[in-house]
Image: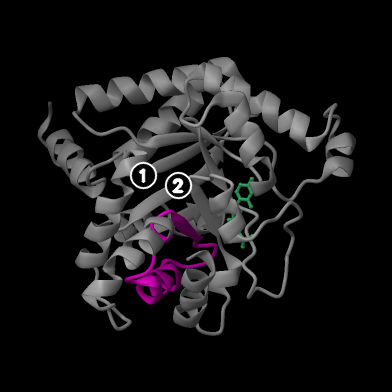
């Protein structure tokens, strides 16, 4: 291994921390995250610790979408979430504006990153792009299931090979099914036959067969995906609107965070209800109260 590769391999490994965590490990992950952040709110008394950990196990699986223009704005949100949220999503807007450095900056704060670039291309291109995301230290990466079986399979093989050679823990690779902003009428106009439910079930099954870790889907499709692909196949659900949020924005197939967790989702992604809140800390407190 060349010198620079050793450096970036060990950086990425430590950036990813323990890497993939199994279901039962969320408790220790939650405790770890509770202890490793500088608290911005008063910490609970010891008697409340268990309740706090149960709550944190869910808060640990909330991913805040950093859909902003600059890295400075993104880092401001990361700071404002400190102590309550440890997972952030970098999507097309921020990545196009600021490039990979913003991912490195978030990783340096000890938080996890979901690199949401929704790769969709020929198998070779998506596989190589995903390996670059691995080098960057992304904890979750997404690709389009509609890119096909071969695209997903080759991507998984390339990631597995790269991680084995460089002794890295593998990130989780999620497949996009149908965007949560699309309803049945729009699917019809695109030319997809079948309802959103039909399409999500079909694309999830294809992703499962190709070996990806789970799918991005609307919270309304969590049980469908789990029933089709088994409980071990994960769901990551945007389209989340907490009770305190006034607006649906452009989301159509939505659910509250509590209902999404109760339905068995593994991660929820939330952007505007948190990032556009007048007071982020207050919004997070309301979220904690809501999902408790
Ligand atoms: O602000 P809001 O909570 O609607 O943000 C949702 C985030 O999840 C956005 O960054 C959006 O790009 C992303 N997303 C989505 N639907 C998908 C996949 C990702 O809304 N199917």
Are the residues tagged 1 and 2 within 8 Å (C-beta)?
Answer: yes
Range covered by the magenta-colored residues: 59-85
**Ligand 1 sits in which quadrant?**
bottom right
Residue 55 is labelled as: none
Give the residue drawn at x 30%, y 20%.
161
Q: Is residue 61 magenta?
A: yes
Give the residue drawn at x 49%, y 62%.
66
Residue 247 vs 217, above or below: the answer is below
Ranked by sequence position, the earlier of labels 1 and 2 is 2
Out of 280 and 77, give the one closest to the viewer. 280
The kind of secondary structure element at disc 2 is strand
The answer to whether the residue bearing label 1 lies less than 8 angstroms from the nearest atom of ligand 1 is no
- Relative placement, left or right, of 118 versus 241 is left
Residue 140 vs 207, above or below: the answer is below
Q: Which residue is mark 2?
A: 115
Out of 233 and 15, give the one closest to the viewer. 233
């Amino acid at each position: 291994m060349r010198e620079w590769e050793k450096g970036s391999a060990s950086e990425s490994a430590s950036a990813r921390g323990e890497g993939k965590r199994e279901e039962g490990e969320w408790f220790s992950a939650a405790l770890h995250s509770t202890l490793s952040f500088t608290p911005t709110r008063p910490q609970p008394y010891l008697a409340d610790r268990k309740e706090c950990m149960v709550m944190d196990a869910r808060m640990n699986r909330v991913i805040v979408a950093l859909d902003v223009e600059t890295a400075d704005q993104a880092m401001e949100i990361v700071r404002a979430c400190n102590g309550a949220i440890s997972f952030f999503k970098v999507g097309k807007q921020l990545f196009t504006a600021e490039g990979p450095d913003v991912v490195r900056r978030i990783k340096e704060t000890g938080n996890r990153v979901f690199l949401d670039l929704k790769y969709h291309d020929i198998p070779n291109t998506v596989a190589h792009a995903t390996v670059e995301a691995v080098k960057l230290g992304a904890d979750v990466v997404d690709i389009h299931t509609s890119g096909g079986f071969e695209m997903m399979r080759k991507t998984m093989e390339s990631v597995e090979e790269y991680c084995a050679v460089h002794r890295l823990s593998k990130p989780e690779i999620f497949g996009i099914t149908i965007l949560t902003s699309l309803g049945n009428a729009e699917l019809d106009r695109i030319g997809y036959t079948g309802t959103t439910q039909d399409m999500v079930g079909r694309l999830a099954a294809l992703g499962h067969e190709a070996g990806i870790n789970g799918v991005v889907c609307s919270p309304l499709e969590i049980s469908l995906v789990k029933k089709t692909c088994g409980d071990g196949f994960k769901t990551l659900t945007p389209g989340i609107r907490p009770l305190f949020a006034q607006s649906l924005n452009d989301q159509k197939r939505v659910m509250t965070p509590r209902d999404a967790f109760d339905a068995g989702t593994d991660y929820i992604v939330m952007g505007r209800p948190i990032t556009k809140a007048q007071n982020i800390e207050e919004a997070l407190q309301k979220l904690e109260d809501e999902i408790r």
